[in-house]
Image (spheres, rainbow, N blue to C red):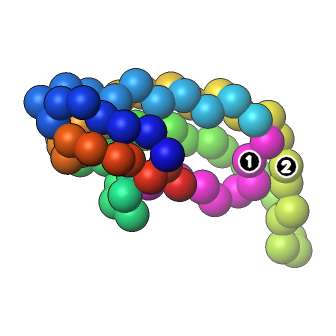
């Protein structure tokens, strides 16, 4: 849980760790909106079966349009 002191600012977000094939950042249950959304593309190619890939990833960006007050990061 983090506290945002002003609602007219952007929250800098970074993630460094192991991530599976699907993942996203959410703040108070919502994805980022605004002109500086956090986007990343990771490409994996496998010929068959259900992948269970775990790789180290680093993502960083800014999230706008978060209301002032407590922010739950998911």
Q: Is residue 71 magenta?
A: no
What residue does disc 1 label?
19
Q: Residues within 10 Å of mark 1 (few under 14, many from 20)?
A: some
Q: Residues within 10 Å of mark 2 (few under 14, many from 20)?
A: few
**Furthest residue in direction bottom, as rendered:** 49
Kindly state the secondary structure of the residue where label 1 is placed: strand
The answer to whether residue 31 is seen in the rendering is yes
Q: Which region shows up in magenta?
A: 18-26
Of 6 and 54, nearer the camera is 6
**Number of marks in picture:** 2
Q: Position of residue 69 (x, y in %)?
A: 27, 44
Q: Is residue 20 magenta?
A: yes
What residue does disc 2 label?
54
Residue ID at (61%, 33%): 15
Residue ID at (47%, 30%): 13
Seen in the picture, residue 24 relative to 6 is either above or below; the reply is below
Marks 2 and 1 in Cβ contact (< 8 Å): yes
Magenta span dominant secondary structure: loop
Seen in the picture, residue 45 relative to 7 is either above or below; the reply is below
Separation of disc 2 and disc 1 at Cα? 6 Å
């Amino acid at each position: 849980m983090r506290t945002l002191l002003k609602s007219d600012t952007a929250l800098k977000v970074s993630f460094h760790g192991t991530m599976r094939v699907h993942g996203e950042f959410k703040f108070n249950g919502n994805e980022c909106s605004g002109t500086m959304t956090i986007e990343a593309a990771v490409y994996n190619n496998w010929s068959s079966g259900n992948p269970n890939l775990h790789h180290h990833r680093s993502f960083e960006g800014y999230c706008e349009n978060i209301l002032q007050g407590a922010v739950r990061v998911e």
